[in-house]
């Protein structure tokens, strides 16, 4: 997030796209509702009538996968009506003319044809966003899980720069991270092309710096593979995989392919707190401690570094993941010895400029938001004040790209997947709480009344849902949350491994799979 | 420069910013005034009257939580009249309160109990009818015992003003007044109640009316060690207290988090049961003849080192992939990045940010 969570409540205009905030991030949903009580305008872009869409003044119920057209349409109106922030564009950005030329054809009427959102609504939302004193854009994977996911984010960034709605309180681009420490995992260099703090591995100076810090002569120069590519290449260019706390068998697209790929490895190590669907395929399973059993830090979606504190001893012989990693490193001839998580953090601060001013000692006084470059730096509430990271903000003109797999005669429905309030990711933890899974025990498929009637199904009837890649059975939930021709479910139930169906087509830049659109057929089961 | 006022509370001169309430002014110098309905984060109904004080010249004993401190004001927080009013207030509350402290989950953390003890008030001053509401426990998260409710309304305001779901409000009048979802339904009837089981109402209940279901019978409040930590679920990063007894996590309660204040969601507050779930992996496992069998750490680590070393030797480090975890800590992700690049010799390290 370029802003902080607390700033959302003070925004005058909130444009929420592809995020079911009140379900996916309930405590950020609280801030959105607070803003509404203070008089903010909320516009929600989402093909589903989500809970947060029902709170909105404008629900832009676009056809799946038409985000770029819609966002370009908003920019088109803002330029046509001279509502753009000329001073900001002049002083802080570049490539505006190219952007202007690209969005010229995205008139509200043209965009209505692509997205199904009425031209008049597009105009009103564009005016509201451009004229607002402060305007925050919130997004999650409804925006990014498309083959054009990165371009979708470019379109969002273009809009914020056009209106100068960035670099100040309550105005900015705010991706809401889905997991406790996605931000931190990225910050810490759990990425194929970057050392900690996004220092490219391809740059020789960075490799020299880290080689010195880690006491080795050299480090591999070629950027590695992303998670999807690692699995794709399993048994081919990848011979062994070490998985810590992930469950790709349920979380990755085209699950049958994932299982086959992992089975074809020479060696698979899985380290987890449960024997997940993925761990069952492993050659060695290492029992890890849960978050309650270890010390450490998480970095949240607003770049806030917070302490995780050990409350109990690890169960059984489980060990904290950091101890296990050190045991493996040491056994392979590279001694990794740390007395505590705090000592590891000290090393992190030495090599990670944005974390350089953070220490466990300071965190005892309160959390800190990076960038926090020095020990007396108070941390950073919002980003891009006065200047962008690269200097001038660059407009990236982008064109509408339809999804990779659209419905046809054989597979006439669009399947979209997401999350439920009561569960988390692949359900490994939330299906075992004694409470959450009791209240929300089974998954269902949201289907519109019109389609249910055509298929002759009632609420709760079992459906067989198939794509070109696989089939699952799931109970029907008849609802107007989805439009005719669209169905929706979550990937959080081992009984409904919906990722057997999803399309592994990826955004070529971010390598994010297109979970939000694939073509399926729906039949009555049995 | 903020305008200030100076008043005298129990003989102590107090200077506070204009607009400060008498209650806040008293608290600022450590003078105790009991409260039920007051909460610094919520609006101030001035409803429960337990915080009354004596201000000479005032026509009654005003509620200190909604009385603004003024220049030259004189306040007595523990005069005979004040004590008598508070005692009567407590007697009236206890007249319609179950005599259940022995087994009540809130024993030791109940304001009614605490103030009754402090002022020496017993339950038998006003014998009469008592409520006999059924206990609402038809959901796995929250137990509502409206017989214990003192109608302070903090749960109502928490749900309206912080959570923003407006699940509950007061219904009926006088002795029949009750806090309830619409149509007198239960929380679990979510189509009507709009409840999402965040439990934020529970976090402000001053008595035993609202309780975390899974914590009932798991230990007295004073037996719990509270460890403040960060939620393991979504990316918001809420803080909460793990409640630990005898080496086990037996509950989650609110703390004052930098991100979330006291607010949590259903997963954060009620989703901790996996920690002690019997399915937890407790020993390393090694696959032998297609089956995973228990092994020692020494065996498992030696095998990992040997096999990874062999792959690296035979095919090169770049043929090894590491999938790190957005569920693990910064320290652990950092070490995975180090292990991968230094020891295994691969940059193919990633995690689930893309999924």
Image (spheres, coloured by chain):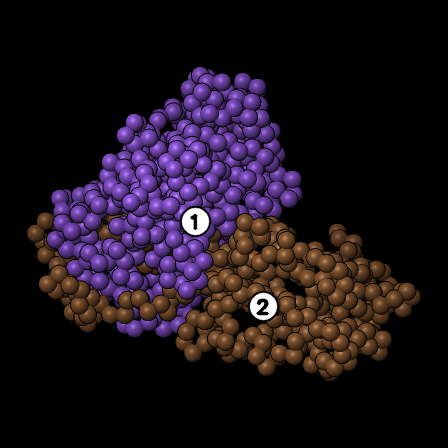
Chain colours: A purple, B brown
Same chain assignment for discs 1 and 2: no
Residue A214 in sight here: no
Front position in the image: B35 or B293 = B293
Above or below A384: residue B257: below
The spot of residue A211 in percent (x, y) is: 24, 52
- Which residue sits at x=88%, y=66%? B60
- Is B147 on the left or on the right of A464, as rendered? right
- Is B153 on the left or on the right of A256, as rendered? right
Task: Give the SS element for disc 2.
Answer: loop
- Which residue sits at x=48%, y=48%? A23
- Which residue sits at x=89%, y=65%? B58
Front position in the image: A70 or A230 = A70
Q: Name the residue at the left extreme.
A: B314
Count of number-bearing discs: 2
The spot of residue A127 in percent (x, y) is: 58, 26
Task: Give the SS element for disc 1.
Answer: loop
Q: Which residue is mark 1?
A: A420
Q: Residues within 10 Å of mark 1 (few under 14, many from 20)?
A: some
Q: Which residue is mark 2?
A: B135
Chain name for mark 1? A
Above or below A194: residue A244: below
The spot of residue A43 in percent (x, y) is: 54, 34
Residue B204 in sight here: yes
* Figure quadrant of the C terminus of chain A: top left
- Which residue sits at x=75%, y=60%? B173
Front position in the image: A350 or A414 = A414
Chain name for mark 2? B
Above or below A127: residue B347: below
């Amino acid at each position: 997030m370029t802003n902080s969570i607390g700033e959302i409540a003070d925004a005058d205009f909130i444009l929420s796209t592809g995020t079911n905030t009140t379900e996916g991030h309930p405590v950020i949903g609280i801030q959105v509702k607070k803003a509404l009580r203070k008089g903010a305008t909320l516009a929600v872009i989402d093909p589903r009538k989500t809970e947060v869409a029902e709170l909105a003044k404008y629900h832009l119920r676009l056809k799946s996968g038409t985000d770029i057209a819609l966002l370009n349409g908003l920019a088109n109106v803002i330029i046509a009506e001279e509502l753009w922030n000329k001073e900001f564009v002049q002083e802080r950005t570049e490539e505006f003319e190219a952007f202007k030329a690209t969005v010229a054809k995205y008139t509200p009427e043209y965009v209505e044809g692509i997205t199904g959102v009425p031209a008049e609504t597009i105009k009103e939302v564009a005016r509201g966003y451009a004229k607002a004193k402060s305007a925050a854009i919130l997004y999650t994977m409804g925006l990014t899980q498309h083959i054009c996911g990165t371009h979708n984010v470019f379109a969002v960034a273009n809009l914020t720069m056009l209106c100068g709605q960035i670099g100040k309180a309550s105005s900015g681009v705010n991706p809401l991270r889905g997991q406790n420490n996605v931000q931190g995992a990225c910050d810490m260099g759990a990425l194929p092309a970057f050392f900690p703090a996004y220092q490219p591995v391809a740059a020789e100076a960075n490799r020299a710096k880290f080689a010195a810090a880690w006491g080795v002569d050299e480090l591999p120069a070629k950027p590695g593979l992303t998670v999807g590519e690692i699995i794709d290449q399993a048994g081919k260019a990848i011979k062994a995989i070490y998985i810590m706390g992930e469950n790709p068998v349920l979380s990755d697209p085209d699950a049958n392919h994932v299982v086959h790929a992992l089975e074809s490895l020479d060696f698979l190590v899985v380290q987890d707190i449960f024997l997940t669907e993925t761990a069952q395929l492993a050659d060695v399973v290492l029992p890890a401690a849960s978050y309650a059993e270890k010390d450490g830090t998480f970095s949240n979606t607003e770049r806030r570094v917070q302490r995780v504190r050990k409350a109990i001893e690890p169960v059984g012989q489980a060990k904290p993941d950091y101890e296990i990693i050190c045991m493996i490193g040491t056994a392979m001839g590279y001694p990794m010895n740390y007395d505590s998580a705090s000592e590891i953090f000290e090393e992190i601060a030495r090599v990670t400029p944005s974390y350089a001013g953070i220490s466990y000692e300071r965190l005892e006084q309160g959390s800190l938001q990076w960038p926090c470059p020095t020990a007396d730096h108070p941390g950073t509430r919002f980003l891009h004040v006065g200047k962008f990271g690269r200097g001038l903000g660059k407009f990236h003109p982008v064109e509408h790209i339809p999804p990779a797999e659209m419905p046809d005669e054989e597979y006439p429905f669009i399947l979209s997947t997401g999350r439920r309030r009561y569960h988390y990711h692949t359900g490994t933890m939330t299906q075992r709480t004694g409470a959450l899974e009791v209240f929300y025990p089974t998954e269902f498929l949201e289907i519109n009344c019109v389609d249910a009637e055509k298929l002759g199904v009632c609420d709760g009837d079992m459906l067989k849902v198939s794509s070109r890649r696989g089939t699952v059975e799931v109970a029907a939930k008849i609802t107007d949350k989805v439009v005719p021709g669209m169905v929706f479910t979550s990937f959080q139930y081992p009984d409904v491994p919906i990722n057997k169906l999803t399309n592994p087509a990826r955004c070529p830049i971010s390598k994010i799979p297109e979970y939000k659109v694939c073509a399926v057929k729906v039949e009555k089961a049995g | 420069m903020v305008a200030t006022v100076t008043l005298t509370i129990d003989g102590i001169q107090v200077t506070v910013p204009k607009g400060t309430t008498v209650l806040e002014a008293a608290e600022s110098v450590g003078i105790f005034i009991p409260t039920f309905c007051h909460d610094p984060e919520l609006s101030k109904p001035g409803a429960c009257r337990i915080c009354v004080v004596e201000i000479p010249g005032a026509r009654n004993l005003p509620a200190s939580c909604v009385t603004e401190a003024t220049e030259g004001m004189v306040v007595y927080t523990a005069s005979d009249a004040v004590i008598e009013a508070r005692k009567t207030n407590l007697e009236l509350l206890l007249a319609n309160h179950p005599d259940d402290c022995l087994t009540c989950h809130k024993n030791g953390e109940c304001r009614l109990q605490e103030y009754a003890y402090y002022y020496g008030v017993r339950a038998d001053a006003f014998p009469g009818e008592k409520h006999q509401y059924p206990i609402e426990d038809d959901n796995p998260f929250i137990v509502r015992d409206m017989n214990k409710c003192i109608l302070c309304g903090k749960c109502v305001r928490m749900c309206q003003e912080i959570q923003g779901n407006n699940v509950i409000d007061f219904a009926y009048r006088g002795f029949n007044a009750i806090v309830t979802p619409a149509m007198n339904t239960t929380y679990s009837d979510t189509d009507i109640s709009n409840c999402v089981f965040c439990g934020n109402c529970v976090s402000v209940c001053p008595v035993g009316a609202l309780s975390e279901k899974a914590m009932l019978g798991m230990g007295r409040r004073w037996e719990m060690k509270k460890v403040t930590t960060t939620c393991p679920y979504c990316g918001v990063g809420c803080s909460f207290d793990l409640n630990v007894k005898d080496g086990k996590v037996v509950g989650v309660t609110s703390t004052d988090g930098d991100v979330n204040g006291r607010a949590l969601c259903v997963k954060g507050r009620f989703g901790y049961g996996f920690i002690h779930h019997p399915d937890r992996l407790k020993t390393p496992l090694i696959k032998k003849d297609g089956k995973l069998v228990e092994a020692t750490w020494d065996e498992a680590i030696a095998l990992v080192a040997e096999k990874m070393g062999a792959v690296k030797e035979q095919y090169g480090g770049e043929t090894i992939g590491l999938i790190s975890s957005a569920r693990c800590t910064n320290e652990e992700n950092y070490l995975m990045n180090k292990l991968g690049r230094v020891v295994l010799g691969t940059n193919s390290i990633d995690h689930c940010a893309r999924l």
